[in-house]
Amino acid sequence: MKKAYVHGYDHRENTRLQDQASTLVELLHSDTFYPAGSRILEAGCGVGAQTVTIARNSPHAIITSVDISEASLKEAKKRSTAAGLNNVRFEQADIFHLPYGQASFDHVFVCFVLEHLSDPTGALRALKHVLQTGGTITVIEGDHGSAYFHPDSEAAQKAIHCQVELQRRAGGNAMIGRELYPLLRRAGFSSIRVSPRMVYADSNSPELVEGFTKKTFTAMIEGVRESAVRAGLLEEHVFDKGIQDLYRTAEADGVFCYTFFRATAKRGDGRTTHSHHCRRR
Ligand SMILES: C[S@@+](CC[C@H](N)C(=O)[O-])C[C@H]1O[C@@H](n2cnc3c(N)ncnc32)[C@H](O)[C@@H]1O
């Protein structure tokens, strides 16, 4: 049986992830560069929507992109070949059982993955293990609690909440962006810096309205219609009104806001992190 809601597995969802990646490249990745020769692990690369950007930004870094899904990896390989990338290799792997030894990588990159995991701290610890001391992790996540817009709409907020609730029932957390700081702390990282990246879309930026408000955010919420109605979370007509109202925010006088969170942190030598914790308690 198909799971209630899983990102990245069907065609429509893949297209959405591609739209999302191309619209947000500047906002999320303008400062994602890795030195020549450094070993990068991209965990949960999905269909490779971010892989192309990070590989192009750092053409001399050696990138290993892994995902648990063979189907997504197949797609990612196709994209990578089409983009002419020659610094990425794809491997099937589970973040919780990585086939790499301690300190195998200089940097880890993980984007839109923790939100789907029931144990994000465990995932971060597993990623820390393969990171060398002094190496960095970059984590990017959204937070659906950060969506606000004009005209405001109760139905739209209810439809968004359906997505949050379905993701929660599937073991994930669609509002994880605000938790990156505590999660990285808990996982034992040091030098944690969180940078909120706000998308603000009005008709001065038609590409954001089209690419983000409509094709990314509203398309994502629209995608859970059936599951939400089937689960009895919302009546059909209210859900449909919510979607209509979200599209309304993309009209000439509409405004849509959403915040992503981009965190970076270091794998310390252990001692620093420990004494830091002790002082704080
Ligand atoms: C929403 S997609 C994000 C893909 C990509 N990072 C992006 O930003 O477009 C989440 C991905 O995480 C993968 N994933 C989920 N759990 C995983 C695990 N335990 N190990 C490896 N990959 C996992 C899924 O297969 C899916 O491809």
Image: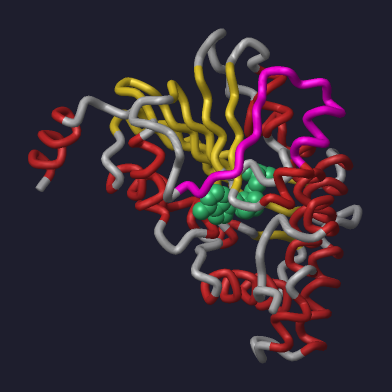
Q: Which residue is drawn at 68% across and 22% down?
A: 55
Q: In this view, does 266 lie above or below 17?
A: above
In the displayed structure image, the side of residue 152 where residue 106 appears, left or right: left
Decide if residue 258 is in sight here.
no
- Residues 188 and 63: in front is 63
Q: For residue 47, which quarter of the picture?
A: top right
The spot of residue 195 in percent (x, y) is: 49, 35
The spot of residue 68 in percent (x, y) is: 59, 51
Q: Residue at x 72, y 88 (%)?
A: 230
- Residues 11 and 236: in front is 11
The spot of residue 8 in percent (x, y) is: 71, 55
Q: In this view, does 232 lie above or below 255?
A: below
Q: For residue 267, which quarter of the picture?
A: top left
In the displayed structure image, the side of residue 141 where residue 222 appears, left or right: right
In the displayed structure image, the side of residue 224 where residue 205 appears, left or right: right
Q: Residue at x 73, y 54 (%)?
A: 256
Q: Which residue is drawn at 45% across and 39% down?
A: 99
In the displayed structure image, the side of residue 268 where residue 250 appears, left or right: right
Magenta stretch encompasses residue 33: no
| Magenta stretch bounds | 76-95
